[in-house]
Amino acid sequence: MLDTDVIIIGCGIAGATTALKLAQNPKRHITVITGESDPSESNTRYAQGGIVSRGLDDSPELLARDILEAGAGASNPEAVELLAREGAAAVQEILVEMAGVQFDTTSTGEYEYGKEGAHSRRRILHVGDGTGLSIITGLVAAIKQYPNINILTNTTAVDLITFPHHSRNPLETYQPVESHGAYAFASKEKTIHRYMSAATVLATGGLGRIYRNTTNPPGARGDGLAMAHRAGARIVNAEYIQFHPTSLALPGVEGFLISEAVRGEGAVLLTPDGKPFMEAYSPRWKDLAPRDIVSRAIHHQMETNGYSYVLLDIATHLPAKTIVDRFPNIYQKCLSLGIDITRDPIPVVPAAHYFCGGVLVDEWGRTNIQNLYAVGEISCTGVHGANRLASTSLLEGLVWGNRAAKHIESVLQQMTTLDLPGFKEVPQWDETGLVAEADAALIQGDMQTIQNIMWHYVGIERNSERLSRAIRELRHLWNEIETFYRTTRLSDGLIGLRNAVEVALIIAQAALHNRQSRGCHYRVDSEVADGDRLI
Ligand SMILES: Cc1cc2nc3c(=O)[nH]c(=O)nc-3n(C[C@H](O)[C@H](O)[C@H](O)COP(=O)(O)OP(=O)(O)OC[C@H]3O[C@@H](n4cnc5c(N)ncnc54)[C@H](O)[C@@H]3O)c2cc1C
């Protein structure tokens, strides 16, 4: 059993920021765990477009207005206002000064602000089209400097330790639910440990991998959301899954994102025979409409005309050198697959990209469970409402990571001693009698079934029949997987499968329950919340 002041589960922008800020007090002992072998592997690493800051002719009010408009009436105005007010200063203090991130500048040394869909101003800081990699590399290097931060890789959290659930004392039943840390699986040693902590921070990111087509890396399977759900945390807005309109559509390529910044810099969507179509769906924004509108427009074009992709043309709209300078990674990736984007249009399809819902938190990242915080994509602060505005999620992870650290520090300062539950009070993980090793074929097969169900029945266009069918099939799978889990020795894949089916059910049920189309939740069979946004 390992004791720590704070355990942070996840090392993307949100978890790393929380750790970095907490470590400023040398008395704090912080443990950061990640299931990956490389601490920088996360959704953060793959962010291309950039992070919102404050442009030259910009203001917090203008940013707040854009976020609220994209959020389709479901964003929490207080959370939006907080992000718009604190964001730019947090970028400067934490990313530029503490993590040493060097955002792109103009020839005169000013920041070069980019533009993306539904932003009324140029305000996005970027490092070419590899912004996330630069951010996470800087943050991980920064936290490694602190002796009071212990980073544990290959360590997958299995479940939160909560009282009364994991307490041996029956009288805990009458107390409010409290978090005291987590059980985690060391995947190299294949052992399970108890990590006891005064505060626990969930920073496990998103869940795109439960869909067949996604831009997310393999670790994004909703682990934190499932753990929080089992512990009794309040989960909201789970029906709002954002589909990115443009992921690369080539055989054998897994969900490579073509950043929204490409449309921001002038690229236009075309049918495979070369006709622009976005004006018909959004006369005001055209190709720079919010993501939900563009994704549905592409989906609609593909479904009604039988296309297997549409095209994105940047070559006609920017000089070749600018394309290569601004989008070096996209250029290289496409070139390696035989497409020269300075000359040819890019074949694209929509893909599951971002989870707008999550564990409900307040302005300090607090959940409804005592001592349990959630930050970043796993949380729902209310900023994104029914649809996230481009490049705001990195900023949300940064701002709420910073705020959660401040709150935890203030709570810990009020404690004279760290009064953690001891060995006797929390049972060890018990695998006695379990000999069967997890069968990789079963894990892969079940995961693919979940991904197909989610893509076809809980995807871009939903209706009651599809959603009910998804729920019936997912319930059956849930039972099978739970039995598999209870009778088999743990593995990282099994932990992920159990969580994937749990979060798939949460999403399908929320989508069935909400009969109103709004933002990225689109019900073809239902009443319209915001008619002018629908196609
Ligand atoms: C291709 C792509 C491009 C994007 N582009 C942008 C962009 O330009 N701008 C923008 O603002 N946003 C962008 N986003 C979204 C943004 O990257 C994410 O929302 C954000 O990085 C999430 O940060 P996070 O810290 O919450 O989670 P992540 O960065 O995903 O980190 C999650 C961490 O949790 C760990 N973890 C998960 N489960 C467990 C477990 N059971 N036990 C232990 N550790 C666990 C992971 O290993 C990882 O360390 C993009 C996303 C993708 C996929």
Image: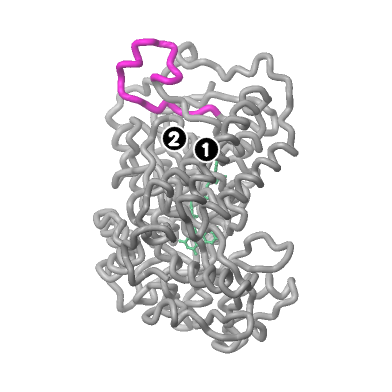
Determine whether 445 is above or below 132 in the image: above
Image location of residue 61, percent across then percent down: 25, 68
The residue tagged 1 is 502
Q: Does 532 appear above or below 362?
A: below
- Label 2: few (<14), some (14–19) or many (≥20) C-alpha neighbours in 10 Å: some
Which residue type does callout 2 highlight? His
Going 63% across and 80% down the picture, which residue do you hit?
Answer: 272
In the picture of the structure, the residue carrying the numbered disc 2 is: 229
Q: What is the quadrant of residue 291 in the picture?
A: bottom left
The secondary structure type at the circle numbered 1 is: helix
**Residue 74 part of the magenta-drawn span:** no
The alpha-carbon separation of the residues under discs 2 and 1 comes to 9 Å
Residue at 53% over, 82% down: 268
Quarter-of-image position of residue 404? top left
Q: Nearer the viewer, residue 230 or 530?
A: 530
Give the residue drawn at x 52%, y 37%: 502
Q: Position of residue 457 (x, y in %)?
A: 54, 52
Q: Is residue 97 visible?
A: no
Element on which disc 2 rests = helix
Taking the image as shown, residue 440 lies to the left or right of residue 157, namely right
- Image quarter of the C terminus: bottom left
**Three-letter amino acid code at the position of disc 1:** Glu
Q: Position of residue 355 (x, y in %)?
A: 46, 52
User: Magenta part of the protein: which range?
Assistant: 164-183
Q: Is residue 173 magenta?
A: yes
Q: Are marks 2 and 1 in contact (CB under 8 Å)?
A: yes
